[in-house]
Amino acid sequence: MRPIAAVGEHGGMPPVTASGVRATWESLPAAVRAGVEDVLSSPIVAAVNQSGGFSPGLAARVRCADGGRAFVKAVGTPLNPESPGIHRREAVVAAALPAGVPVPRLRGCYDDGDWVALVFDEVDGRMPHDPWRPDELRLVAAAVTELSRSLTPCPVPSPRPALDALREQMLCYRTLAADPPADLDPWERRHLDRLADLAASALDVVDGDTLVHFDLRADNVLLDGSRVWFVDWPWAFRGAAWIDSVMLVKNAVFHGRDPEPYLDGHPLLAGVDPWYVTAFLAGMAGFFREYGRRPAPPGLPTLRAFQLAQHATTLAWVRRRTGWA
């Protein structure tokens, strides 16, 4: 079986991390800072800006004059015109999550139409090691399984159904097949029509009644001892219970881990045809390839390189699972 490390037939890619250029607490407009302090009912006396992720907005741990602590994320249309809407979607999901789910509690929001700030309970945790360590990956994989079980049936009123949330991604190979780029991976080019049909078929199998995070990767996980927390929920939708486990393992592939041992015997995949998983992964590979060739969005200069790097490792996994020559 061809190893995952073999990324395409034309060589590998340099390591790419999930990172961008973030605003700082000090750079926020005064009205936004005041709005966050109103949510916290106390002036902020210290802020530690955080890195990681792609948003151009703020991510900061803050300390208040009354001794309270919180985590704040904020973004405005001057940084990226789409990002405030992403924060608004996350606020709707976070506010509806039931108590006991390992997600930081949303304490309040500030929204002036241009800037949106979300204020969460602070989690005294850290991101997993980069690249994934086997012990941490096993811990998080088990926690994702329990998360999906706890979010079934879907507790958020009227979230997007999987068919709506995933339609564009799963049809990206059809877009590529209509006008194939000159620099497609040779194996990918040979099987482009088959990949397009395979990815589109995933739309028949992604339905379900679980709240799916859909962006599970190392920088959206916090470890607090043996406890695992899941953050950043703007892309959540209602779908199949197994999707988040596959998304996590896809991120492990990106970090060089063999994915199959984490899926073999997985409790949420019992009774799920392995070809369904392959179809979903083909859709994700097509999405990364199609979007990775687009111009970078405002304020997110590293996003496209990260998508192309994920395309390479996801495609290698799809090639391994299909067995197509």
Image (tube, rainbow, N blue to C red):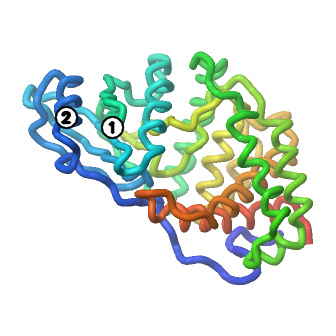
Q: Nearer the viewer, residue 273 or 86?
A: 86
SS class, disc 1? strand
What is the distance, in whole Å, between disc 1 and disc 2 at their CAs? 9 Å
Residue 16 to residue 194: above or below: below
Q: Which residue is mark 1?
A: 115
Q: Quadrant of residue 32?
A: top left
**Viewer-side residue, 145 vs 301:** 301
Picture coordinates of residue 148, whole percent (x, y):
62, 30
In this picture, residue 62 sits left or right of residue 202: left
Is residue 120 among what the camera can see?
Answer: no
- Residue at 60% across / 23% down in the picture? 151
Q: Give the residue at x 7% y 30%.
A: 65
The amino acid type found where label 2 is placed reads Ala
Which quadrant, please, contains the C terminus? bottom right
Residue 80 horizontal side relative to residue 242, left or right: left
Image quarter for residue 241?
A: top right
